[in-house]
Amino acid sequence: MSKDRPSSDHPSTTDWTAKIFGPDFLNVLFRHPLDPGYADAAAKRQQEGPPGRFERLLGRTLSTVALVMVGFLLAVAYLQTVTEEPERAKVRAALAEQIRQRNARTDELAARAEELRAEVARLRDSVLSSDDAARLRMLEATVGLARVRGDGVVVTVADAPPDAVTGTDPKLSRVLDRDLQHIANALWSAGAEAIAINGQRLTSTSTIRSAGDAILVDFRPILGPYEVTAIGPKEMMKRFEDSGTARLMRQLVRDYGMQFQVRAADDLTLPAASDPRLRYADPTSTTSPAPSGRGRSLTPSGGS
Amino acid sequence: MVPVLALLAGAVLGLFLDPTVPVALQPYLPIAVVAALDAVFGGIRAKLDGVFDDKQFVVSFVGNVLIAALIVYLGDQLGVGAQLSTGVVVVLGVRIFGNAAAIRRRLFRA
């Protein structure tokens, strides 16, 4: 720092314009918050003497008007904020109410679908021979379209409790859609015949994905703690416990305090999944199920 | 005395008339308030420093509000309205705090 450089602490009014474009603009702003125009005006007054009577009156009137406008502005802004707030709360409440209504309606429709499905099954059974009916029921249970019962395991996973000190909910200690996917896949590979997550039965086309902070199973949001229920053979629990997924989950429990628990359960009942609607794939007309060779597409076999 | 009365009169006028702000102008209201506060605090400090000037006060008030509104408008058109608003609030906030500190020092010697 050279001595002859003008100190930036108290720039005179003349070198202000030079300073304002300098790299220390913020510095100047922090040190001299007062509009430099006031100093300029004071200097001018000192040079030319006090302004005339008319001029002073005009200035006084104008600044009074400006102050009235400032007060007006403050009052208007205050009123605006006050009136806006309940409006926002109202909109949010209305949206939440809509979500609740739609959820209730979906549950209602799902129950009705279940009822109708049972009725269809009953009517169909009365028409078909008992052999065919049994086979059909078996197939339905396999693909997840019928309610099933049996022994199996219940895997419970939950987010880590919020930090006791800060009360924050760290992102890393949440259960992710990926965790549930891994668990479901490990259960399938351990021999599970039917799996449901929080009462949502998984089929071959089920999706487990996240949207925002929520996890969707087949587009229905589910909340933690997550319960993955699987029906399968006796060895399933041991196989699952030995799987890489279970090891990974235990690691997560150690590292992030997530909760993970596997227990055997008898006489589980898994609900039916909602009917998958085929929009693009048509069933083939041949009655005997063709062995699905690799690379064969789902298009109907026209016979050509 | 007169300035305080003028400020109060404006506030009463606003509360009494309760004008509806057009939707197009609503985003500019908070910024205009901050700009106006900056002008008012600058004016008070200048008064205490003994350099108050009516013309300078009026010009800084009108200019602050207009430029703040212009910046927000420009930001909205460019799609960075929120960021530019933040910038305006930061710069004006720094000035308001600086002037308020000077006023405090002058009034309470602390």
Image (cartoon, coloured by chain):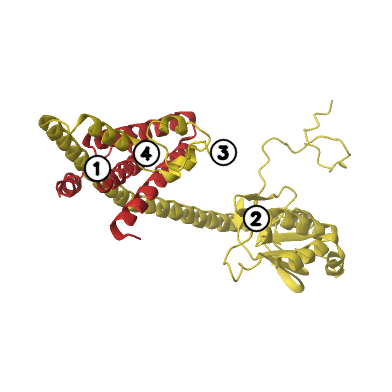
Marks 1 and 2, Cα distance to the nearest angstrom?
79 Å
Q: Is residue A231 in sight in this rendering?
A: no
Q: Element under label 2?
A: helix
Q: Say which of marks 1 and 2 sits in front.
A: 1
Q: Give the answer, above or below, for where A1 lies relative to A206.
A: above
Say whether mark 3 and mark 4 are on the same chain: no
For mark 2, name the chain.
A
Give the left or right position of residue A102, taking residue A110 as reference.
left
In this view, A140 is above or below B55: below
Earlier sequence position, callout 1 versus callout 3: 3
Which residue is identified by label 3?
A2
* Camera-side mark, 1 or 3: 3
Where is residue A232 drawn, in percent x and y? 81, 65
Residue B46 seen in the current view: yes
Q: Are marks 1 and 2 in contact (CB under 8 Å)?
A: no
Tell me which numbered mark, 2 or 3, is placed earlier along the sequence.
Answer: 3
Where is residue A236 shown, x and y percent of the image?
84, 66
Q: Which residue is mark 1?
A: A70
Of the chain colours in the picture, the one used for chain B is red
Q: Nearer the viewer, residue A230 or B62?
A: B62
Q: CA distance from mark 4 to mark 3?
A: 48 Å
Of the residues shown, which amino acid type is indicated by label 3? Ser
Chain of the residue that carries numbered disc 4 in the rendered image = B
Image point (24%, 30%), residue name: A47
- Determine if marks 2 and 4 fall on one subunit: no
Question: What color was chain A assigned in the picture?
Answer: yellow
What amino acid is at disc 2? Leu
Q: Secondary structure at mark 3?
A: loop
Determine which residue is flagged by label 4: B27
Element class at badge 1: helix
Residue A115 position, x and y percent, is 59, 58
